[in-house]
Amino acid sequence: MKQKQILLFIIFILYHSSLFGHTYFSETDKKIKLISDKASYNVSEIAKFINFNFRSEPEKIRAIYTWIANNIHYDIERKHIIRYYDNYEQLNDLALKTRKGVCMSYSTLFL
């Protein structure tokens, strides 16, 4: 009986945390969409916008995630090309310019 109660409690917590977690970041998701198009082509300008508009670390992380998810598309043509010679700045500049990237582009933008 005790195990069943614990299981129900865990399900309850997971259910409610997913519901409230979704609404917790709704303002963050709206605000990150207000970044100007001009600023969104430069990593330092994106960082300035995020640091000015968001206070907590979870909000900043969510803002970065939301911006990348809404603006960078997976580059299917380059998915098998490995470019070892690129540094982070080159990868970020290319992803911001083309609005496309591969796995490494997503991770370096998130850094």
Image (cartoon, grey):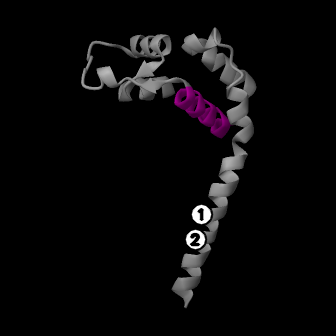
Residue type marked 1:
Leu
- Please indicate whether residue 104 sits to the left or right of residue 29 in the image: left
- SS assignment at label 2: helix
Residue 37 location (% of width, % of height): 64, 12
Q: Determine crowd level at label 1: few under 14, some 14-19, many 20+ residues with C-alpha closer than 10 A.
A: few
Which mark, by number, is residue 58?
A: none
- The residue shown at (56%, 11%) is 41
- The residue shown at (48%, 17%) is 99
State the image quarter where residue 43 is shown.
Answer: top right
Does residue 54 appear in the picture of this structure? no
| In the rendered image, the vertical position of residue 30 relative to residue 51, given as above or below | below
Residue 21 location (% of width, % of height): 66, 51
87, 73: nearer the viewer: 73
Quarter of the picture holding the N terminus: bottom right
- Please indicate whether residue 62 sits to the left or right of residue 86 in the image: right
Residue with the most extreme front position? 77
| In the rendered image, the vertical position of residue 85 relative to residue 111, given as above or below | above
- The residue shown at (64%, 36%) is 57
The magenta stretch spans which residues? 55-70
Residue 103 location (% of width, % of height): 37, 29
Residue type marked 2:
Ile
- SS assignment at label 1: helix
Does residue 15 appear in the picture of this structure? yes
Residue 42 colored in magenta in the image: no
Residue 28 location (% of width, % of height): 70, 35
Judging by the rendered image, the residue that carries numbered circle 1 is: 14
Residue 67 colored in magenta in the image: yes
State the image quarter where residue 61 is shown.
Answer: top right
Which mark, by number, is residue 10?
A: 2
86, 74: nearer the viewer: 74
Q: Determine crowd level at label 2: few under 14, some 14-19, many 20+ residues with C-alpha closer than 10 A.
A: few
- Distance from the alpha carbon under mark 1 to that under mark 2: 6 Å
